Image (cartoon, grey):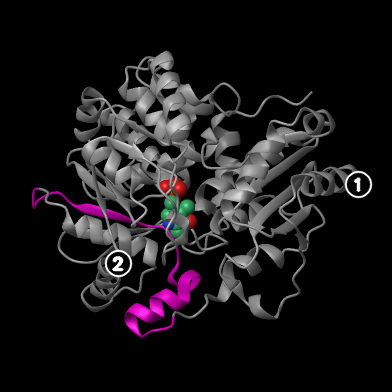
């Protein structure tokens, strides 16, 4: 049997202080000047020390981050006196999900190699997760990946980044339906005893703890470059599933002085309503120019609520049960008060997003993507002490969302060289109806052929 993956249970994140998972001020100061890989090793070592030596972790980080096209991996770019962008999109698929999934691919390989367990990764994607996960595991032994996307509802760049990966262990499925339909099928498969009896299912969605752990790193990397830990830094994070910003919360709980975490949503604003008024109620999803944030219910938000409740599992189970029944609940005032000591939130509509995109271009000299522009608009709207630097997480390369960038700025971003002849490459994918049994039968048959 292979050793288990070093994926801590959902609750592990918050035992940081008790279990010595914090970094002291001196340890944070000592990160100054370290490169990204070395920063990653120092920040993640406490989480994986039981299963990986520091040298093993370093080897995996070097392999993962060696595939980024920028030597700094996640470079900081200055926009004006106080605003900065943390560019998280220099990985193989041009979105921040590569930062975590490239490492996850290395971890899978490390823990599966030499064993006789084969895993079957099944996921649904609205665009960016799919290509990042496929890039991370394509061609690896012991892994089959099945990625469902809603047919016709991801951008051409996003689809081709998935479907032109022709490695035999990669299976793309275009579903006749919405992202929610695809996601519902994946959830059903994970609960399907017959399927579980035939394959070892594995998920790569954003509640995967190893993904969160890898995302904590860049908060440290950016903060020490701007004077941390001796100067608090604010971060503005374009948010969908609350994964990226939750990593910021973990960084803060580990001891990094963070002045503010700004939850920037688009008009799908359940998180903003929840944090500003306690109204946690799901409506219908409105499609926007920032599709990766067109989400109503964010899986990772429950983790924050759990921590804010004083880690009261029973209370959270009751609250989430109520939410599942009514699609609505009210967050208690004491928990809201706790959240507001660190989090601010705002909802950015399409016009404000476009304005921020143009501001970055005209004033900061940077062409940014619409998701990053939502973050930047929120950062600029926020009233913070003038001496606190504000870092907006730039989550995707502008070329990934060329139409929206062109609409706002008149400039059509060029595809980066690393995408090469994306539009000339052969595509391979299977179209299936929205019928669960057909999808299940396809996955089980293909996985068995392995
Ligand atoms: C996934 C994604 C987001 C949202 O990240 P969460 O961790 O789900 O909050 C924002 N921007 C881009 C480009 C993404 O791909």
Q: Is residue 174 above or below residue 143?
A: below
Q: Of discs 1 and 2, which sits in the foreground?
A: 2
Q: Is residue 380 left or right of residue 188?
A: left
**Camera sees residue 30:** no
Residue 379 in percent (x, y) is at 22, 56
Which residue: 62% across, 68% down?
Answer: 152
* Residue 60 or residue 337, whichever sits in front: 337
Q: Is residue 198 left or right of residue 334?
A: right
Identify the residue under disc 1. Answer: 449
Residue 286 in percent (x, y) is at 42, 59
Which residue: 57% across, 47% down?
Answer: 101
Tell me the distance, in whole angstroms, between the alpha carbons under discs 1 and 2.
47 Å
Q: Secondary structure at mark 1?
A: helix
Q: Give whichever of discs 1 and 2 has the lower sequence position.
A: 2
Residue 263 in percent (x, y) is at 30, 47
Residue 318 lies in the magenta stretch: no
**Stretch in magenta:** 385-412
* Residue 135 or residue 278, whichever sits in front: 278
Q: Are marks 1 and 2 in contact (CB under 8 Å)?
A: no
Q: Is residue 289 above or below residue 261?
A: below
Which label sits on residue 353? Answer: 2
* Residue 379 or residue 437, whichever sits in front: 437
Which residue: 76% across, 63% down?
Answer: 429
Which residue: 45% across, 78% down?
Answer: 403
Q: Secondary structure at mark 2?
A: helix
Q: Is residue 143 above or below residue 409?
A: above
User: In the orientation shown, which residue stands out farthest toward the left?
Assistant: 386
Q: From the image, which quarter does the N terminus lie in?
A: top right
Q: Quadrant of residue 85?
A: bottom left
């Amino acid at each position: 049997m292979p050793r288990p993956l070093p994926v801590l249970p959902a609750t592990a994140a918050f035992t940081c202080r008790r279990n010595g998972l914090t970094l002291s001020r001196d340890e944070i100061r000592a990160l100054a000047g370290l490169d990204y890989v070395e920063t990653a090793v120092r920040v993640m070592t406490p989480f994986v020390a039981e299963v990986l030596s520091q040298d093993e972790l370093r080897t995996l980080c070097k392999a993962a981050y060696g595939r980024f096209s920028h030597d700094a991996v996640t470079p900081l770019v200055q926009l004006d006196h106080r605003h900065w962008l943390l560019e998280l999109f220099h990985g193989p698929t041009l979105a921040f999900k590569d930062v975590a999934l490239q490492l996850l691919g290395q971890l899978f390989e490390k823990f599966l190699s030499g064993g006789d367990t084969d895993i079957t990764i099944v996921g649904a994607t609205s665009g960016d997760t799919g290509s990042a996960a496929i890039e991370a595991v394509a061609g690896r032994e012991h892994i089959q990946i099945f990625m469902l996307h809603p047919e016709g509802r991801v951008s051409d760049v996003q689809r081709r980044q998935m479907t032109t990966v022709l490695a035999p262990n990669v299976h793309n499925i275009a579903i006749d339906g919405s992202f929610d339909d695809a996601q519902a099928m994946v959830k059903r498969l994970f609960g399907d005893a017959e399927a579980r009896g035939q394959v070892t299912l594995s998920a790569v969605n954003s509640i995967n703890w190893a993904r969160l752990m890898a995302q904590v790193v860049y908060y440290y990397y950016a903060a020490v470059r701007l004077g941390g830990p001796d100067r608090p830094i604010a971060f503005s994070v374009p948010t969908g599933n609350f994964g990226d910003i939750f990593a910021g919360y973990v960084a803060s709980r580990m001891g990094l002085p963070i002045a503010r975490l700004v939850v920037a949503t688009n008009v799908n604003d359940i998180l903003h309503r929840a944090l500003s008024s306690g109204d946690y109620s799901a409506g219908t999803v409105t499609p926007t120019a920032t599709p990766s944030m067109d989400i109503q219910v964010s899986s990772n938000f429950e983790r924050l609520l759990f921590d804010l409740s004083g880690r009261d599992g029973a209370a959270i189970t009751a609250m989430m049960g109520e939410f599942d029944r009514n699609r609505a609940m009210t967050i208690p005032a004491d928990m809201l008060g706790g959240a507001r000591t660190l989090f601010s939130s705002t909802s950015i509509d399409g016009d404000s997003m476009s304005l921020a995109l143009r501001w970055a271009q005209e004033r900061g000299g940077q062409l940014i993507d619409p998701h990053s522009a939502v973050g930047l608009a929120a950062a600029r709207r926020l009233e913070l002490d003038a001496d606190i630097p504000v870092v907006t997480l730039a989550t995707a390369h502008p070329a990934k969302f060329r139409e929206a960038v062109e609409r706002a700025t008149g400039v059509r971003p060029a595809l980066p060289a690393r995408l090469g002849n994306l539009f000339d490459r052969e595509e391979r994918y299977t179209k299936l109806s929205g019928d669960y049994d057909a999808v299940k039968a396809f996955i089980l048959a293909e996985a068995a052929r392995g």
